[in-house]
Image: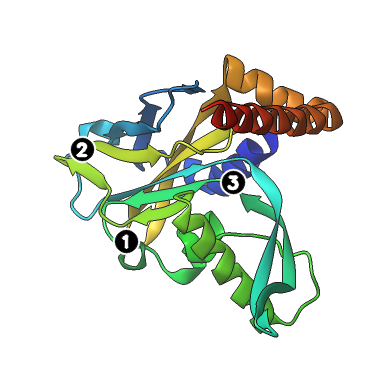
């Protein structure tokens, strides 16, 4: 988290030079989201204000993009093909730093706000994620696996874009709502806000959001991580016990 914040600050350092540029005052509706047994998802509100130095009037053509990003993790994408009538994993690709969750919302489509270079620098949009492939495969193969991974994460509602998800009121106040799915990964998240004018990112700010499991869910997750062998043995034993109990009930009936 510290490294991510340091990188964010480094990217936005040149923006602090001009004291006449607008500034962002962002916030989030929840800095901590708790996952309990009844958790079915949540909605996170990212909102704030654009402060114009010297009391200047809001400028037309000001846009906002917000990004909610989960902790990065290594992922392996596997490609299935039909071999002798059976679907099998044939090829795979490893990514060293894929975000476990990524959502971006903007006041207009990103392609109308910034060019490809700026999008790549700030990782604005799914096509600009720095996934860090860990294989020496040809570029076209890497691109194919990147597209497959992004499509898979989108279908699991862990990656998505909303090109009209940010609303700006009178050029000063903004808000965006991002849906958090029930199966969201836990960890430290960053909520980044970018102020964009004339194709340039002129201001940025970041807030932190913590998503964590509590209660029985936390106990199960901790047990699976720390005592994996015992957890697996217990899970198998419970499955066998429940199967035996079910069959015994049917026999009595």
Q: Nearer the viewer, residue 81 or 189?
A: 81
**Residue drawn at point x = 22 percent, y = 44 percent:** 167
Q: Return the residue at label 1.
A: 198
Q: Are circles 2 and 3 on residues that touch, CB within 8 Å?
A: no
Give the mark nearer the N terminus: 1 vs 2. Answer: 2
Give the mark nearer the N terminus: 2 vs 3. Answer: 2
Q: Identify the disc placed on residue 81.
A: none
Q: Return the residue at label 2.
A: 56
Q: Residue 40, percent across and down?
A: 40, 31
Is the N terminus in the top left, top right, bottom left or bottom right quadrant?
A: top right
Q: Nearer the viewer, residue 207 or 159?
A: 159
Q: Residue 72, percent across and down?
A: 65, 45
Q: Return the residue at label 3.
A: 100
At mark 3, the secondary structure is: loop
Q: Is 179 above or below relative to 147?
A: above
At mark 1, the secondary structure is: loop
Distance CA(mark 2)–CA(mark 3): 40 Å
Q: Nearer the viewer, mark 3 or mark 1?
A: 3
């Amino acid at each position: 988290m510290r490294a991510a914040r340091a990188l964010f600050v480094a990217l936005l350092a040149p923006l602090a030079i001009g004291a006449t540029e607008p500034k962002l005052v962002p916030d989030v509706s929840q800095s901590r989201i708790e996952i309990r047994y009844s958790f079915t998802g949540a909605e996170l509100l990212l909102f704030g204000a654009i402060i114009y130095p010297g009391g200047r009037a809001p400028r037309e053509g000001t846009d906002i993009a917000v990004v909610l990003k989960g902790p990065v993790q290594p992922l392996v994408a596997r490609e299935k093909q039909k071999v002798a009538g059976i679907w099998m994993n044939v090829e795979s690709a490893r990514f060293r730093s894929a975000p476990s969750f990524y959502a971006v919302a903007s006041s207009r489509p990103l392609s109308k706000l910034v060019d490809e270079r700026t999008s790549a620098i700030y990782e604005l949009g799914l096509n600009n994620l720095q996934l860090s492939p860990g294989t020496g495969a040809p570029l076209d193969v890497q691109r194919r696996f990147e597209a497959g991974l992004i499509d898979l994460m989108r279908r699991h509602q862990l990656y998505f874009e909303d090109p009209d998800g940010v609303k700006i009121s009178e050029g000063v106040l903004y808000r965006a709502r991002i849906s958090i799915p029930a199966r969201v990964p836990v960890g430290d998240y960053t909520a980044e806000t970018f102020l964009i004018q004339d194709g340039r990112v002129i201001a940025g700010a970041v807030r932190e959001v913590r998503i964590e499991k509590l209660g029985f869910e936390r106990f199960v997750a901790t047990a699976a991580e720390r005592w994996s062998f015992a957890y697996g043995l217990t899970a198998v034993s419970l499955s066998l016990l429940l199967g035996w109990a079910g069959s015994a009930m049917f026999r009595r009936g």
